[in-house]
Amino acid sequence: MSEIFLKQSTPANPVAAEDLTATVSGILREIEAGGEAAALRLARKFDGWSGEIVVSDAAIEAACARVPQQLKDDIAYAHDNIARFAEAQRASMTDMQVELRPGLIAGQKLIPVTSAGCYVPGGRYSHIASAMMTVTTARVAGVPHIAAASPPRADALAGIPDAILYTLHYCGAHRILAIGGVQGVAALAYGLFGLEPADILVGPGNQFVAEAKRLLFGRTGIDMVAGPTDSMILADDSADALVVAMDLVGQAEHGPNSPVWLVTTSARLAEEVRRLVPTCAARLPEPNRGNAERAWDALGEIVLCDSFEAMAAYADRLGPEHLHVQAADLEWWRGRLRSYGSLFLGAETTVAFGDKAAGPNHVLPTTGAARYTGGLSVQKFLKTVTWQTVTEQALPQLAAVTARISRHEGMEGHARTADIRLERLAQNAPKR
């Protein structure tokens, strides 16, 4: 198997990890010590928002009234798909019990976490879809307390854009905070502004949000530590070069740190896509155009392989967040590929469908993490706990085995908890 790079990435130097960690950990300590007052002070400083942090019912109602009906209908369509997929996921996970041996019964129980903190990014774009993906999935899982935080914008009457507020309310968020960045994550985690402290933090964000979640992991659960979004296309000679180029540009517009890759067996397709990508990017409005051009120039790659197997092996090594197959024999690809956040099969199945409205969750592992984990799902909000019960029928053998293993390990106290039950069983046995 061979790989030839027709275009290779030249990434810029990122912010030093130690500098990022020091900055974020300092903010978290300040908020933990100072509580709501510290969070409010930092929100005023970093978000530039002087309004209320907790979005009132009246403000939500007013925002909902300002959202156009067509957008409400579109949100309802996407929400229905996301909810139905999450409901199917939940139905696939069940409580169970099994009698391992006569009198030894064990089982599992799925219990929703008590509280979820959903972070919805702001910045360049209004992330309606992220609001749907996080809150809807938590609601379907049965989480009783769902809070959301999103960065306020000066041009939004309630701080958070009307469409995001409407979506959070429609999907079932119980409390919404107009606060972003590290201070927003901290408010969710520490239970500020009237929230329940989050048992799990979910949702994408910039590098400061991701680092805050990483540092808080252990104190709270997290969905994953996510980096910049990335996308890979696997294509053969049958693929339409213009469609492939537009798909690459469509994902590159996320920002200049978002890698996109084309891996193909076709030199003709590779050269045509290489020619068309700058043209497709140039037709976007600003700032989308600049984002896409910088991402393609610095992080775009075109890799020429000699076989489908070589393409699949390359994809498995990188573990892309989004993996889009535009090649023959889709069933072969679905069975062969092993490392991806979400798989998009066929030329008609653009990644944007999954990003916005198709149903499967778009909060996905990035930066190669798809090699060992999947994305956000109902399961992330559920604890799979186990239980067991033992009757006299199972006790003699189980206790004897436990005592012997415990003594071999040097754990005499463990052994004696088994011994005492054997002794009591013998004492209570009917006399013959």
Image: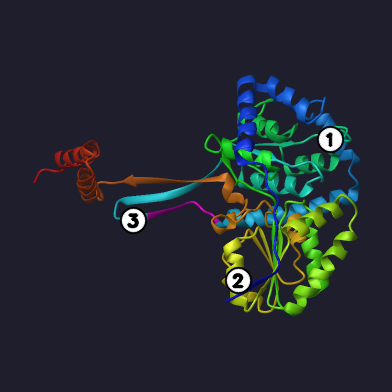
Secondary structure type for disc 2: helix
Q: Which residue is mark 2?
A: 312
Q: Quadrant of residue 202?
A: top right
Q: Position of residue 407 (x, y in %)?
A: 20, 43
Mark 1 or mark 3: whose residue is earlier in sequence:
3
**Residue 398 at what x, y percent from top left?**
25, 49
Mark with earlier residue (1, 2): 1
CA–CA distance between discs 2 and 3? Answer: 41 Å
Q: Which residue is mark 3?
A: 100
- Which of the 4 image quarters holds residue 172? top right
**Residue 313 colored in magenta in the image:** no
Answer whether residue 212 is visible to the viewer in this image: no
Q: Residue at x 40, y 45 (%)?
A: 387
Label 3 sits on a secondary structure element that is strand
To which quarter of the image does residue 195 belong?
Answer: top right
Q: Position of residue 357 (x, y in %)?
A: 76, 56
Quadrant, the N terminus: bottom right
In the picture, the disc for residue 153 is 1
Within 10 Å of the Cα at label 2, are there few (<14), some (14-19), or many (20+) other Cα atoms?
some
Instruction: Say whether marks 2 and 3 touch (CB < 8 Å).
Output: no
